[in-house]
Image: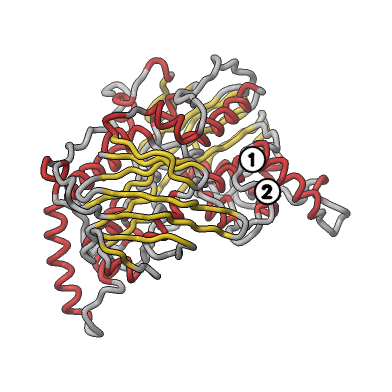
């Protein structure tokens, strides 16, 4: 990623100006869980201020209080030196605050223009609102590199462009303070670079940005100051230039953290998975997989690199039993049915395939169900979870969940809490625990550390490597090239539904992989 420009001299010299945001002694509890405890924070105007911490540290809760989604149990909020009450998001918008959430709040079947004016119309007749919005979007696009077709339907846009729409929505409502929650969790490296240029432009124009992220490299590249949270408390605020990744990681977790994946060389065994001529055509007649061939052995991790939308998701869905396909797939030498008659997830699990899906919320969890119910999700027919042929053993599931929560450091370790009450990283740990605990022959992993903090990343990586070292096969899909290079024993690059080629991690780099991800032939790359 490119380093963003430094903050302008006028911003750095504005030490006498009141903070753009000041939080004083903010506390918030959810039942027995103290999410924020006596937090104070000052954010200088015209700066990019990073907030980091482990999942469950209270970062998103604190920002949700600032944006009016939650009310603090105690404490005070000041904007530009003046106390303000923010009982809801409309009050936050009136105070000049905008927020871009990790999971976008867009209406998928409306146009960009319609999404931008939604809730900010001039009156019942939309023609004037649309005309004004069109002109303002054109100006914002020029000012901040936020180019996007105003007439495009949101569901047809890439994730990076959908994020631009969210930023445009906030700027259209005249947000002087912009909060971004894990903004690069779903972006490619190129899209993340573009986002950082946008943030640098916002800073240059005097806007204030709060960046919630777990990625230390991003903190070092784009922020002016950084605050560290741990277990609901603010433990430090530092000038970014005066710290480093190792120091920040230790402050976040409370111990030294390995920033590189520690693993011995692979010891590949017999072939577990063979894919030959795999093809998938979607409902609109578009071919998503165009003759995929690959092989994966026991005791190795095959990493699939590629820009999102180039067939990786369809590959996981076929192997996981959620998508029909043509071609041939062999698991431990025996064919898997791809016609849809028996290609469901249950039959895959019975064959020894476990699946950590890319989207934990829509595919991996039932958000309103308790953690103990989700830990048995898909495996509820297992003998240890049955009292008899009819009744399930809820107590056994709860006991298994408590054990998995302890083993995988899920916070808070409360099996009765619904999945939606956990942070994104702890939701991911629940899914990873459920699948790895079944000791599968083949583990399919999609974006295993998306939106996950540095301590949890280290933990999940170690568990994936331990599964490999136990002689299991792992197919890893990730848009994070450093994750692919750190975890994989072999790397296959996908572009436009095809395998562009394979590389060994020690014999390639991000530049070569990036060229292959952009569609350049192996020879050219």
Crowd band around label 2 with a 10 angstrom C-alpha radius: few (<14), some (14–19), many (20+) = many
Whether residue 398 is situated above or below residue 215 in the rendered picture = below
Q: Between residues 261 and 220, which one lies in front from this camera angle?
A: 220
Residue located at (50% from left, 44% from top)? 55
Which residue is outermost to the right?
A: 388
Asked if the residue under mark 1 is in contact with the one under mark 2, i.e. CB atoms within 8 Å, the reply is yes
Q: Secondary structure beneath disc 2?
A: helix
Q: Between residues 329 and 249, which one lies in front from this camera angle?
A: 249
User: Which quarter of the rendered picture does the N terminus lie within?
Assistant: top left
Left or right of 315? Residue 206 is left
Left or right of 150? Residue 212 is right
Residue located beneath label 1 in the image: 433
Q: Please indicate, yes or no, whether residue 206 appears anywhere in the rendered image.
A: yes
Q: Position of residue 294 (x, y in %)?
A: 50, 29
Q: Where is residue 155 in the image (x, y as percent from the top left)?
A: 35, 60
Whether residue 375 is situated above or below residue 351 in the rendered picture = below
Q: Earlier in the sequence, mark 2 or mark 1?
A: 2
Q: Which mark is residue 375?
A: 2
Q: Between residues 386 and 200, which one lies in front from this camera angle?
A: 200
Q: Position of residue 337 (x, y in %)?
A: 63, 43
Left or right of 453? Residue 373 is right
User: Which quarter of the rendered picture does the C terminus lie within?
Assistant: top left
Crowd band around label 1 with a 10 angstrom C-alpha radius: few (<14), some (14–19), many (20+) = many
Q: Secondary structure beneath disc 1?
A: helix
């Amino acid at each position: 990623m490119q380093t963003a420009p430094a903050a302008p001299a006028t911003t750095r010299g504005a030490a006498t100006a009141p903070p753009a945001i000041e939080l004083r002694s903010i506390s918030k509890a959810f039942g027995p869980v103290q999410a924020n405890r006596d937090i104070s924070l000052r954010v200088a105007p015209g700066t990019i201020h990073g907030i980091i911490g482990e999942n469950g540290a209270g970062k998103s809760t604190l920002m949700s209080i600032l944006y009016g989604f939650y009310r603090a149990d105690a404490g005070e909020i000041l904007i530009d030196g003046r106390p303000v009450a923010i009982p809801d998001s409309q009050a936050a918008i009136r105070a000049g605050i905008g927020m871009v959430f990790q999971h976008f709040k867009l209406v998928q079947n409306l146009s960009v223009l319609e999404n931008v004016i939604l809730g900010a119309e001039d009156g019942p007749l939309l023609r004037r609102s649309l005309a004004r919005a069109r002109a303002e979007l054109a100006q914002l696009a020029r000012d901040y590199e936020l180019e996007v077709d105003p007439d495009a339907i949101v569901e047809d846009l890439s994730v990076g462009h959908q994020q631009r729409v969210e930023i445009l929505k906030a700027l259209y409502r005249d947000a002087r303070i912009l909060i971004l929650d894990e903004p690069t969790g779903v972006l490619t490296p190129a899209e993340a670079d573009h986002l950082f240029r946008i943030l640098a432009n916002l800073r240059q124009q005097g806007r204030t940005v709060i960046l919630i992220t777990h990625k230390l490299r991003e903190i070092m590249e784009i922020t002016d100051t950084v605050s560290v949270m741990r277990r609901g408390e603010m433990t430090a605020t530092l000038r970014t230039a005066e710290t480093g990744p190792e120091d920040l990681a230790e402050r976040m977790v409370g111990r030294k953290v390995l920033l590189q994946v520690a693993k011995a060389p692979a010891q590949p065994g017999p072939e577990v998975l063979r894919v030959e001529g795999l093809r998938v055509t979607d409902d609109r007649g578009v071919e998503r997989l165009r003759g995929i061939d690959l092989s994966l052995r026991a005791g190795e991790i095959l990493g699939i690199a590629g820009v999102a939308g180039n067939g990786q998701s369809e590959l996981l869905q076929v192997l996981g039993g959620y998508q029909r396909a043509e071609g041939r797939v062999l698991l431990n030498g025996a064919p898997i049915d791809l016609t849809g008659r028996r290609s469901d997830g249950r039959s895959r699990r019975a064959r020894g395939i476990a699946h950590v899906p890319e989207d934990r919320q829509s595919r991996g969890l039932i958000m309103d169900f308790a953690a103990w119910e989700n830990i048995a999700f898909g495996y509820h027919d297992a003998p240890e979870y049955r009292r008899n042929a009819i009744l399930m053993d809820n107590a056994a599931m709860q006991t298994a969940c408590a054990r998995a929560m302890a083993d995988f450091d899920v916070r808070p370790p409360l099996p009765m809490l619904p999945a939606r009450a956990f942070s994104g990283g702890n939701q991911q740990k629940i899914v990873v625990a459920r699948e790895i605990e079944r000791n599968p022959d083949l583990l399919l992993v999609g974006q295993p550390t998306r939106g996950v903090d540095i301590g949890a990343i280290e933990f999940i990586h170690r568990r994936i490597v331990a599964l490999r070292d136990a002689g299991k096969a792992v197919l890893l899909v990730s848009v994070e090239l450093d994750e692919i290079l750190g975890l994989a024993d072999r790397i296959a690059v996908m572009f436009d539904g095809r395998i562009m080629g394979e590389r060994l991690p020690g014999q390639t780099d991000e530049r070569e992989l990036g060229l292959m991800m952009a569609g350049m032939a192996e020879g050219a790359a």
